[in-house]
Image (cartoon, rainbow, N blue to C red):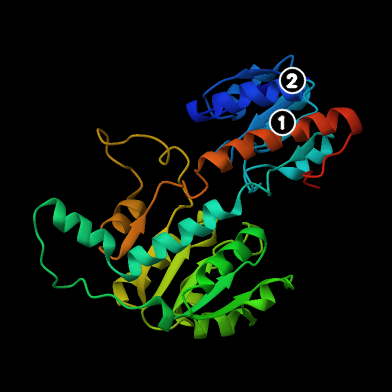
Amino acid sequence: MKVIAYAVRPDEIASFEEYSKIYNHNVTLIKESFGPHNAHLAEGFYGVSILGNCKANKEGIEAIAKLGVKYLASRSAGVNNIDLETAKKYDIKVSNVPAYSPNAVSEFAVGITLCVLRNIQQAIRRVDVQNFGLSGLMGSELRNKTIGFIGTGRIGLATIKAFSGFSGKLIGYDLYENEEAKKYIEYKNLDELFAKSDIISLHCPLTPENYHLINKESIAKMKDGVIIVNTARGGLMNAEDLIGGLESGKIGGLATDVYENEVGIFHSDHRNSILEDDVLVRLLKFPNVLFTPHYAFYTDEAVDNMVEYSLESLSEFEKTGKSKNEVK
């Protein structure tokens, strides 16, 4: 199959070279993210590979459909950037990579939680300017906390297991309860989870139903000083409402690897430019907020998996018309 891969990072090239031979694909790699503006580059290709920061909206899908593209394989787990209805309308098969190493995200979630809980970010900044004082750095111990997990699928379960070693109380919420997760957590309804959790860790996909799940109303239901951790999708949080919670002290800390309007900002160097997103600028100024540039997934194993499984899906589509990672 002739495949065009968009948004290819240098660290993916070796994996593309390896797995394109295994799955007998002729792959063209380009570094620009996919969108309606460059969908025309897919002319002559049957398969398109994209990342989660690509804009596979109605216009983009329609454009590649007119070019004869039959398959769209995302190298990411989330599909909120893909207009699935339009893809279905034009009979374009879509797949994602839900099964890349869940440990990549789960270990990262534990790490950034500890950074906020123990004020590690502030301590590092102080030492960088030779300030070795302790004032304001007192933290608290994870073993004394109740941790609430929203989303208990593969990544959520791996994160639950990772946190279980700290002996804290673990609770969770999911529309579909996971029997394996029940060995570690007690399921609660969402309001109970908000009310009982000292730390809330997000691990659910972004859907129209849970858009801005973390908002003014839900924050009001939370414990004073709650810590919110997000390694899922930025759209799960209303950033303006987060600012209100941080300013009032209702939110004691925020550790997030994602931001709703991150496309065009994250994964780029903006040291010599002015950020035009005032909400992001305001959030970055809080000392108890830790932002990372959407790289919880970014391990050698996970990156290799993401390329391999996306090309595998394209091969399955070509041979059988369906894939085990097909998104309906």
Q: Which residue is mark 2?
A: 25
Amino acid carrying label 2: it is His
For disc 1, the neighbor class at 10 Å (few under 14, some 14 to 19, many from 20) is many
Residue holding disc 1: 311
- Say what secondary structure mark 1 lies in: helix
- Residue sitting at the far front: 165
In the image, residue 156 sits, relative to residue 86, either above or below, namely below
**Residue located 74% across and 14% down the image:** 44
Q: Earlier in the sequence, mark 2 or mark 1?
A: 2
Indicate the position of residue 214 as horizontal and vertical percent values. 51, 68
Query: Residue at 53% of width from left, 54% of height from top?
Result: 105
**Dots 2, 1 in contact, CB < 8 A:** yes
Q: Position of residue 151 (x, y in %)?
A: 63, 66
Residue located at (72% from left, 70% from top):
178
Q: Is residue 99 left or right of residue 290?
A: right
Q: Assign the N terminus to one quadrant of the image.
A: top right
Asked whether, in this view, residue 235 is left or right of residue 129, the answer is right
